Amino acid sequence: MGWQMKQVTIAGMTLQLLPEKAVYIESLEILLVSDIHLGKSETFQSLGIPIANQINQVTIDRLHYLCTALTPKMLIILGDLFHSNDGLVEEVVTQWTRFVDSISTTITVKLIVGNHDRQLIQSLHHLGVEWGTEALQIHQLVLSHYPEPQPRGLNICGHIHPCIRIKTRLDNLRLPCFFWIILLVY
């Protein structure tokens, strides 16, 4: 493939950590993404904050690229598909439903509802995704938006927005990263 990925094996499960802010589990044909926050720029604009809204299409293009290149059977969003009700404007909904329609014959899209999605539950019925509010257990994986307090398996979650900061005298970079912690439960 054309990208640089890091492969790790945790609890017997091989995960491909992708620079496109996604995790691919080839053995299960599952692509995981989290905290997409579609409509965030529209939400900020509704509050009078000037911000470009091309980020939605860039995000959807990234998802489409991953789905096309990896051909997963399932795309699971670990919460926060949308940012808020104010961001759920026609343009954002159209971009999202067009994306789902383009992959729906081969890929099932599931959403684990996150804190930003909770206020939008009524709208989720019309957006082409299966959704639920509880953690999803698939084999030894526990998929959730929030970290599970006592997972029965490898818990992969969103919500945390991990990043690494690189500071110099001239620059201050904040870059997304993957973060994991191993909890020993006795």
Image (spheres, rainbow, N blue to C red):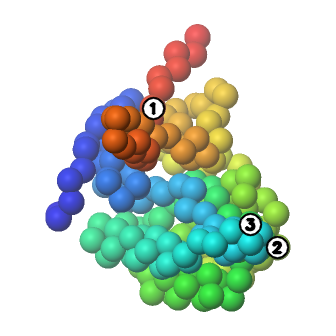
Q: Which label was assigned to residue 180?
A: 1
Q: Give the residue type that dot 3 points to.
A: Ser
Q: Residue at x 44, y 81 (%)?
A: 103
Q: Secondary structure at mark 3?
A: loop
Tag nearer the camera, 3 or 1? 3
Q: CA distance from mark 1 to mark 2?
A: 33 Å
Q: Residue at x 54, y 45 (%)?
A: 161
Q: Which residue is mark 3?
A: 84
The quarter of the picture where the N terminus appears is bottom left
Q: Position of residue 62 (x, y in %)?
A: 39, 70
Side of 129 relative to 134 (left or right): left
Tag nearer the camera, 2 or 3? 3
Contact? badges 3 and 1 (CB < 8 Å): no
- Rendering quarter of residue 65: bottom left
- Pick whichever of labels 2 and 3 is earlier in the sequence: 3
Dot 2 crowding, Cα within 10 Å, few <14, some 14–19, many 20+: few
> Furthest-left residue in view?
2
Side of 17 relative to 91 (left or right): left
Dot 1 crowding, Cα within 10 Å, few <14, some 14–19, many 20+: few
- Which one is nearer the viewer's eye here, 162 or 64? 162
Q: Which label was assigned to residue 20?
A: none
Q: Residue at x 41, y 55 (%)?
A: 22
Dot 3 crowding, Cα within 10 Å, few <14, some 14–19, many 20+: many
Q: Position of residue 177 (x, y in %)?
A: 40, 43
- Rendering quarter of residue 126: bottom right
Q: Which residue is mark 2?
A: 122
As displayed, is residue 53 above or below residue 77?
below
Side of 3 relative to 139 (left or right): left
Q: Residue at x 34, y 35 (%)?
A: 169
Q: CA distance from mark 2 to mark 3?
A: 13 Å
Q: Secondary structure at mark 1?
A: loop
